[in-house]
């Protein structure tokens, strides 16, 4: 089934808006106002799965319009949700308390930092792929001349 180009533009725009809101507003605000980084991380950790799963769905839906961007979008969101997020959860469980309580050179804290960086990077890749897909979908709405 082919998704109408306008629906593709709307879906991608909504997803990009949500991702930017989480990255630029929700996460920084949580870390700024909540009483601990652990609580802020828990809040953001509850929001990210919705963002990544919806990125997978939207990315798959736009496949007919922009195949390469769609595959990148789905792959990066899936990697973040299905590979990185479970590893972060295991590290948090192994730490058993605030990550900040560990020494800076503690292997668990270093691993957590690397996984966090990977998650942020994959969100960035997903956003870039979605932006490319949006650009391609927008071009398809322009009248041929």
Image: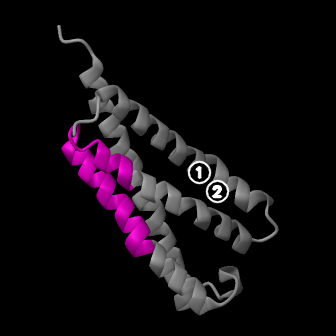
Residue drawn where x is 43% and y is 73% of the image: 84
x then y, percent, for residue 114: 47, 75
Q: Depth check: give the residue in front, 43 or 50.
A: 50
Residue 126 as seen in the image, left or right of residue 26:
left
Residue drawn where x is 46% and y is 43% of the image: 15
Q: Which mark is residue 22?
A: 1
Q: Are marks 1 and 2 in contact (CB under 8 Å)?
A: yes
Q: Is residue 116 magenta?
A: no
Q: Which residue is mark 2?
A: 27
For residue 118, what is the image quadrant? bottom left
Q: Depth check: give the residue in front, 15 or 111.
A: 15
- Judging from the image, the colouring scheme is one colour
The secondary structure that dominates the magenta segment is: helix
For residue 95, what is the image quadrant? bottom right
Residue 17 as seen in the image, left or right of residue 72:
right
SS for dot 2: helix
x then y, percent, for residue 52: 45, 58
Say how many tags the image has: 2
Q: Where's the C terminus, which quadrant? A: top left
User: Mark 1 or 2 closer to N-term?
Assistant: 1
Query: How far apart are labels 1 and 2 at the CA level?
Result: 6 Å
Which residue is situated farthest in the top direction here?
145
SS for dot 1: helix
x then y, percent, for residue 112: 53, 79
Residue 105 as seen in the image, left or right of residue 53:
right
Write the start and end of the magenta stretch as one range: 56-84
Q: Is residue 81 magenta?
A: yes
């Amino acid at each position: 089934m082919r998704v109408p180009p306008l629906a593709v533009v709307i879906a991608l725009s909504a997803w990009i808006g949500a991702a930017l809101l989480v990255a630029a507003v929700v996460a920084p605000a949580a870390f700024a106002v909540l009483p601990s980084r652990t609580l802020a991380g828990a809040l953001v950790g509850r929001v990210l799965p919705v963002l990544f799963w919806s990125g997978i769905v939207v990315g798959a839906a736009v496949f007919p319009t922009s195949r390469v961007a769609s595959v990148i979008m789905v792959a990066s969101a899936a990697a973040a949700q299905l590979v990185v997020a479970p590893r972060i959860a295991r590290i948090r469980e192994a730490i058993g308390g605030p990550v900040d309580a560990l020494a800076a050179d503690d292997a668990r804290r270093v691993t957590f930092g690397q996984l966090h960086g990977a998650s942020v990077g994959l969100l960035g890749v997903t956003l870039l792929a979605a932006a490319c897909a949006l650009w391609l979908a927008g071009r398809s709405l322009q009248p041929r001349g």
